[in-house]
Amino acid sequence: MEMESLRCVQDILQRSNGILCPYLEPGPIARHLQSEGLLSLNDISDIQSNHRKDRQVQKLLDILCYKPESAYLEFMKALEKQDEDLFLRIRAVEEFKSYIPSKLSLSFKTVFHIEKTKNLSLLKVYST
């Protein structure tokens, strides 16, 4: 994977941590990624060795940071099928990242809010 692409995926996953950890069910997505040959048995074992769901999600995200970009793309496909709302929130992080300079860091308390209408998703960003 190209170094810039790897940094971008890592950045998106790190920024998405707070969105995903409380809500994502890591088991089905990890199994899907394994079936696609993107996670190894050792990766699955590392994820499952954590007893708390939020730590399993964190471990999955950590592992994805060092996988090829195709693993991230497949993760997003699986996420869209499992939880469309979480998928849209991560897409908002991706879109927001493309609009800000790389040297600008988001506040820890940056809040993303997506308003869905019939044909439009509106991203509102609040930072304290």
Image (cartoon, rainbow, N blue to C red):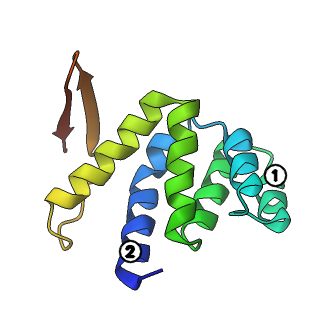
Q: Could you tell me which residue is drawn at 17 percent across and 67 percent down?
A: 104
Name the foreground residue: 34 vs 54.
34
**In what element is the residue under mark 1?**
helix
Q: Could you tell me which residue is drawn at 15 percent across and 57 percent down?
A: 99
Horizontal and vertical percent position of residue 115? 23, 23
Name the foreground residue: 28 vs 19.
28
Q: Nearer the viewer, mark 2 or mark 1?
A: 2
Residue 123 vertical position relative to residue 74 in the rendered view, above or below: above
Horizontal and vertical percent position of residue 44? 80, 58
The residue labelled by disc 1 is 48
Residue 85 vertical position relative to residue 19 in the rendered view, above or below: above
Distance CA(mark 2)–CA(mark 1): 28 Å
Q: How many marks?
A: 2
Q: Amino acid at mark 1?
A: Gln
Horizontal and vertical percent position of residue 19? 45, 41
Q: Is residue 53 left or right of residue 49?
A: left
Q: Could you tell me which residue is drawn at 57 percent across and 74 percent down?
A: 66
**In what element is the residue under mark 2?**
helix
Q: Amino acid at mark 2?
A: Ser
Residue 60: which disc? none
Report which quarter residue 23 is drawn in: top right
One can see residue 51 in this view:
yes
Q: Could you tell me which residue is drawn at 26 percent across and 31 percent down?
A: 113
Residue 83 vertical position relative to residue 32 in the rendered view, above or below: above
Other residues around mark 2 within 10 Å, as few (<14) / some (14–19) / many (≥20): few
Other residues around mark 1 within 10 Å, as few (<14) / some (14–19) / many (≥20): some
Residue 5: which disc? 2
N-term mark: 2 or 1: 2
Q: Quadrant of the C terminus?
A: top left
> Which residue in the rendered view is the most extreme toward the front?
36
Horizontal and vertical percent position of residue 3? 40, 84
